[in-house]
Image (cartoon, rainbow, N blue to C red):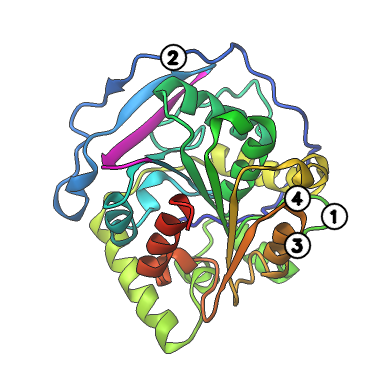
Amino acid sequence: MVVGCSSGAGAASSAKPSRTSTPKAGVPSTVPNSTLSGVGAFMGPVHQVPDGAITIGYRQFGHGPSLLLVSGDTAAMSLWSTYLLRPLARHFRVTIFDNRGVGYSTDDLSQQMTVPLMAEDTAGFITALGLRRPTVAGWSMGGEIALTLAETHPALVGRVVTSGGDAGSSHTVPPPPNLIAELNTPNASVTVALKLMFPPTPAGKAATKRFVANYLAVPQETVSATTLARQAQAEESFLAYNGVWDKLGTIRTPTLVTNGALDQGVPPINARRLAKHISGAKLSIYAGCAHGMMFQAATKFAAQVAHFANGE
């Protein structure tokens, strides 16, 4: 079992993204036999679309304005719980996708994987699908991608929601060293991941039980060891990269910053710092929740995103 978590291990310097080609509107194709049964049937089949040098796999469902969900480090789109996606789909046309190298998306190993590069992937993906200024909601590393996208391609984004994300640089308060070591141990146990996502409280234990049941009910996509290592390197690189932090003050896209009050993976002080440096940003700290706050408080989070997207 994998879980989206910012701040992985590895070593590299963050670099400006480079693309082999400029993204153009692609022609999506449908992956045969990819429609799920059971609780995930409403999400429909997986589609794939060219995006520069790679191909992005995605699903779309629901009705309303566009909402693009960006997954976290190590997480495939299959990790999004259906009990979060269903209420979102009542308000939005939801698009979920796999980051490069994950699940149904391909990678280009000639390019160093970085958060800025994945933001370029996301920009190309929005362009390829013709999404019109979607609300972009990113969890963990997905929040980092969303913030980077708001800085580099503001015309493509209508609103930004971050959850358990940060802006890199030395201004970010990282997880405790022992937690990083546990998470980056080969074949890290499910227990370690769940401990990061949910607190050891009655509410947290109930949320854990619900999350695991949904996880087992939806066929999970694979994330290769190569991709895990490349993502870990990208996260470590991002902590030494000042580019996104230094430009937070230039963001004019309406932004909602959320975080779990008990999040050890991305301590909530990071959310407060983001909200302070992004003009007009709204801040919402979820009491009693950790890194998986949107799963523990799914109904509340979905409603908050819907209200925010409507300008409320």
- Left or right of 217: which side holds 227? right
Percent position (x, y) of residue 204?
Answer: 44, 80
Of tags 1 and 3, the one toward the viewer is: 3
Q: Which SS type dominates the magenta stretch?
A: strand
- Is-magenta flag for residue 56? yes
Work out whether residue 177 or residue 168 is closer to the camera in this orientation and state it. Answer: 168
Q: Counting residues from the N terminus, which is met first, the one under dot 2 or under dot 3?
A: 2
State how far apart marks 2 and 3 are (Cα): 37 Å
State how far apart marks 1 and 2 are (Cα): 37 Å
**Image quadrant of residue 120?**
top right
Per the rendering, the mark at residue 273 is 3
Judging by the rendered image, the residue that carries numbered circle 1 is 170
Judging by the rendered image, the residue that carries numbered circle 2 is 25
Q: Residues within 10 Å of mark 3 (few under 14, many from 20)?
A: some
Do we see residue 49 in this rendering?
A: yes
In magenta, the rendered stretch is 54-65
